[in-house]
Image (cartoon, rainbow, N blue to C red):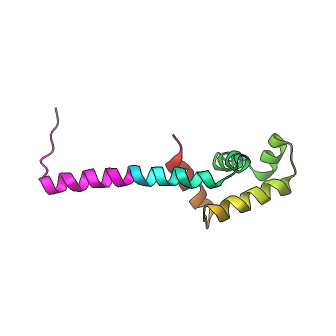
Amino acid sequence: MFFLNLSETDFEKIIDFVIQLKKDKINQKKDLEVLTAKEKEVFEMVANGFTTKRIAEKLFVESSTISTHRKKIKQKLKFKSNYDWYNFYNQVRV
């Protein structure tokens, strides 16, 4: 069995850090609640690498509709870049 030689203070810092990570993940999942069901569907498809055109084909809508969904998602979740989008998705997915 492996034991770390940590001071009580270091151990508490680690525990606090883990607790904060859990809280952040919960808050991010709550952030998703501002999206409509269709926006959540588009959000996941974009995060999985689908293009606007491909999403439109799969959902039987115009590409402009998907572009509008993408724009609204970015506004609601305050994404500045695609990196924000993918990073957020990777943090909230189970």
At 78% from the left and 58% from the top, the residue drawn is 67
Magenta segment, prevailing SS (helix, strand or loop) = helix
What residue is at 15 percent from the left and 44 percent from the top? 4
- What span is colored magenta in the figure? 1-21
* Callout count: 0
Residue 34 x/y as whole percent: 63, 55
The percent coordinates of residue 47 (x first, y second) are: 63, 49
Locate residue 53 relative to residue 77 in the image: left or right. right
Farthest residue, direction bottom? 80
- Expressed as whole percent of the image width and height from the top left, the position of residue 27 reads 48, 54
Q: Who's the residue at 51% across and 54% down the image? A: 28
Q: Quadrant of residue 24?
A: bottom left
Q: Is residue 9 magenta?
A: yes
Residue furthest to the top in view is 1
Residue 32 relative to residue 50: left or right:
left
Image location of residue 78, percent across then percent down? 60, 65
78 to 43, vertically: above or below = below
- Is 75 situated left or right of 93 in this image? right
Is 43 inside the magenta-drawn segment?
no
Q: Nearer the viewer, residue 49 or 88?
A: 88
Quarter the N terminus occupies: top left
In percent of the image, x 50 and y 50: which residue is there? 91
- Judge by depth and name the residue closer to the eye, 20 or 51: 20
Q: Nearer the viewer, residue 5 or 38?
A: 38
